Amino acid sequence: MRSHLLNDTTAERYRGSVTEGVERVAARLATTSRPFTGITADALAPRVDAVDLDEPLHDTLAALDELEELYLRDAVHLHHPRHLAHLHSPVVIPALVGEAVLSAVNSSLDTWDRSAGATLIERRVVDWTAGRIGLGRDADGVFTGGGAESDLHALLLAREAAGDRDPATLRVFTSQAARPGIRRAARVLGLGEDAVVSLPTDRNKRLQTVALARALDRCRRDGLAPMAVVATAGTADFGSIDPLPEIAKLCAQYGSWLHVDAAYGCGLLASRRYRHLLDGIEHADSVTVDFHKSFFQPVGSSALLVRDRAALSRTTHRERVPDQAGKSLRTTRRFDALKLWMTLRVMGADAVGDLFDEVCALATEGWKHLVADPRFDVVVEPQLSTLVFRCVPAAICAPATIDRANLYARKALFAAGDAVVAGATVGDRQYLKFTLLNPETTLADLTAVLDLIAGHVEQYLAERGEHLDRAC
């Protein structure tokens, strides 16, 4: 039906339909008291499966009513202050305005004749980001679908920079706390099974530079090629930042491409308080940033930045007409840069950085509270906004039992909808994780959730009779 196509004759219908959708979301946000309803997949799946997609409702309001029942009512609400799991932030309103505009205009960021000004805006945002990193005047970049794509693209550039070396001789060095996708990217690129070398971390879960130096030296002595070192500025599990200046010196010494995965830590680029934690990132050959993690942007908003634009693209201008073709692994790309552009133009970088500073400061407060609370064991002092810990009852010491009790507590919180927390593995033990990305979350929220966790752990032990008689 042509009446559903967006054009000059349907502008009013577009306005009314989108406004109605926004109203539904706004009403749900205003009345949500918990981060989750606790609904199970078994309860929700039959209702979704019962929808006949071959029988349309022919009415936007009816479709929104149905969506309310199938999605909005039970959605996990990231905006809630007790959603404490995953690298997934609440979003700022200017970015949502940009999302609405880019979706409706539907530009594709590959050639000028599909995007026009959108191309220039993406380039300007890329230049701004590269400037914040300190990559220099020859830097360039491109928006991607996410951090995994950025890391894959960076390793592709590193492989090309290695020349015609036998792929079986190429090695990529990273820490044991790095993104698992690095190994997957190496497989996609056709590197050998042993291509990715995972190196140990120190007590703060940062790559050990001594181990890296030894591995690079061994690589050279064995006649292999140290294709790349992937340093992490904000590991997913711990928020740890690898020692970037020292790693950069080793890369220069051994001729390795330095890629910094700053998907999480990129929020520090706008920070007025913690920017120094990224010192050394300016020496990178390539950098991954995920604005949808710590710049409070809607998914997805990510980019790959490179020091040398020649490494990224052979096609930059055609007859003085700018385009982005040849820079990306994809052809059709959304105008995701508009979301960050609107955020910077309305709020400014300082305001975004201040929001990230708030959650980092809260993590420090939370760490101090955990250290002082005898019920909990906390792994490391946070560099960013992640806390990894577990409840350790005084009357029990069997590690496997503690693992099960903490896992039970996490599931019980989610089932009740009282809070959403994540899990992490430290060694072979099960821990819990707070990833703090909501500036509305307070220390009172953290302590309330910790009390709930401790209560669920004690309940688990009591119901199974695992108490003093199992103590060491």
Image (cartoon, rainbow, N blue to C red):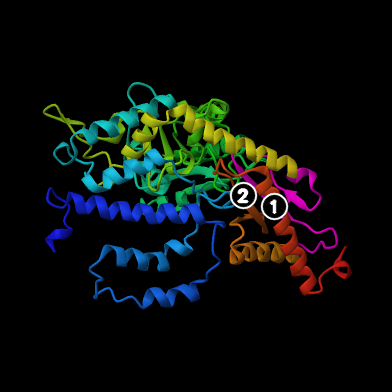
Q: Position of residue 380 (x, y in %)?
A: 69, 43
Residue at (52%, 56%) from the top-left corner? 32
Residue at (12%, 51%) from the top-left corner? 9
153 w.r.t. 44: above or below: above
Closest to the observer, 329 or 441: 441
Closest to the observer, 390 or 186: 390
Q: Label 2 amino acid? A: Phe
User: What separation in Å lies between label 1 and label 2 (alpha carbons)?
Assistant: 13 Å
Quadrant for the N terminus in the image: bottom left
Provide the residue span drawn in magenta.
Answer: 370-399
Q: Is residue 416 magenta?
A: no
Closest to the observer, 23 or 85: 23
Q: Position of residue 433 (x, y in %)?
A: 62, 52
Residue holding disc 1: 448
* 20 sits left or right of 26 in the view: left
Quadrant for the C terminus in the image: bottom right
Q: Is residue 371 magenta?
A: yes
Dot 1 crowding, Cα within 10 Å, few <14, some 14–19, many 20+: few
Q: Which residue is most to the top? A: 137
Residue at (34%, 33%) from the top-left corner? 341
Label 1 SS: helix
Label 2 SS: strand
* 308 sits left or right of 388 in the view: left
